[in-house]
Image (tube, rainbow, N blue to C red):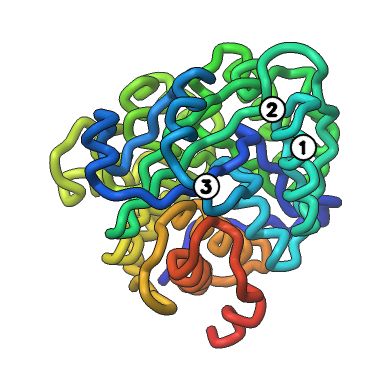
Amino acid sequence: MRESFRHIERKRIFDLIGLGNAIVDIIVNIKDEFLEINKLEKGSMNLINSNESQTLLETCKVIKKISGGSSANTVVCLAELGNNVQFIGRVKNDQFGNFFSSDIKKSKTIFNTTPTNEGASTAHSIILVTPDAQRTMCTYLGASIEFESKDIDFNVIKESKYLYLEGYLWDSELAKNAFLKAAQIAKQSNTKIILSLSDSFCVDRHRESFLELIDNYVDIVFCNESEVLSLFKKDKLANCQGDLSSLCELVVVTLGSNGSLIINKNVIEVIKSITKGKIIDTTGAGDIYAGGFIHGLIKNYSLKKCGEIGSICAGQIITQLGSRSNIDFRELIKEI
């Protein structure tokens, strides 16, 4: 594959800085009937308030708690692969906030954001896992909605190879402004900017501003098939090839069991999916794929190898509950 994508050669202190919602993931096993009773669409991400969160939790059995959020999952994956990475997200000085801070640091992810003593409580997401391993998220954004520029140390962005931005932040005007300021500083500093589109419903809400953001700042986009269709208002992925090729320097589209596509200008590389066992929970699979892929970019591997690493990491994470691997990713990718 002849690649026009240029990896970063200049030395930086950090490999990647990730901005995103700091969310405590609460994993729950349910049956399909639970979704019907609560009028939830399978596979969707639903924003809820604190009262709705409490009502759902009263009717569920919590299996696991993890320091999550889309960007955080990707950053932790990179940390576990041995990269020097930092996550920036807003938490309150409360039970969930203390758990998030303590838990994410276990992976050697740098997390220096000072907890706030005011405002909404720390965000959390109830992840409802059905027997088919699909996950439906009910998220209370809490403190994440109040994420703003003062929560960011912009100096670390200047000293990073990559800045990773989570599309979900676009739902808050304060966070959006912080997001844009970070992107501007990254561009001025020649820090490559990566955007995760996060969710097709998120794309529906912000389609035009996402396209403008990508055009002005973004070097790499991570997305799945439904997000692509939403972004370009198309009904088939095959009809999006021209749009994807011209979107930005590098676009990576995850396709679940059908693998992934790497679009580098007019060249497309097809990557097969890799499953490391029985599928238990697809939570965070796309985030972990992105972490594996970006690890390859940091190591200056070919784009094909980057995709293969992403597939191996994602193929492992779906065989267990939650988005933290119980097997060393570094051992897994030695086979490539």
Residue 260 seen in the current view? yes
Foreground disc of the pair 2, 3: 3
Coordinates of residue 160 in the picture (x, y in percent): 77, 46
> Disc 1 or 2, which lies upstream in sequence?
1
Splitting the image into 4 quarters, where does residue 235 fall? Answer: top left
> Disc 2 or 3, which lies upstream in sequence?
3
Q: Secondary structure at mark 1?
A: helix
> Disc 3 or 1, which lies upstream in sequence?
3
Splitting the image into 4 quarters, where does residue 1 fall? Answer: bottom left
Residue for point 52% across, 47% down: 62
Name the residue tied to disc 3.
Answer: 62
Are circles 1 and 2 on residues that touch, CB within 8 Å? yes
Residue for point 55% across, 87% down: 335
From what the image shows, is residue 96 above or below residue 151? below
Name the residue tied to disc 2.
Answer: 182
Q: Return the residue nearer the eye: 223 or 121.
A: 121
Taking the image as shown, residue 41 lies to the left or right of residue 122, namely left
Residue for point 57% across, 41% down: 69
Coordinates of residue 290 in the picture (x, y in percent): 52, 55
Q: Residues within 10 Å of mark 2 (few under 14, many from 20)?
A: many
Q: CA distance from mark 3 to mark 1?
A: 36 Å
Please name the amino acid that badge 1 sits on: Ile
Q: Residues within 10 Å of mark 3 (few under 14, many from 20)?
A: some
Are circles 2 and 3 on residues that touch, CB within 8 Å? no
Name the residue tied to disc 1.
Answer: 157
Taking the image as shown, residue 116 lies to the left or right of residue 223, namely right
Residue 311 seen in the current view? no
Q: Return the residue nearer the eye: 24 or 296.
A: 24
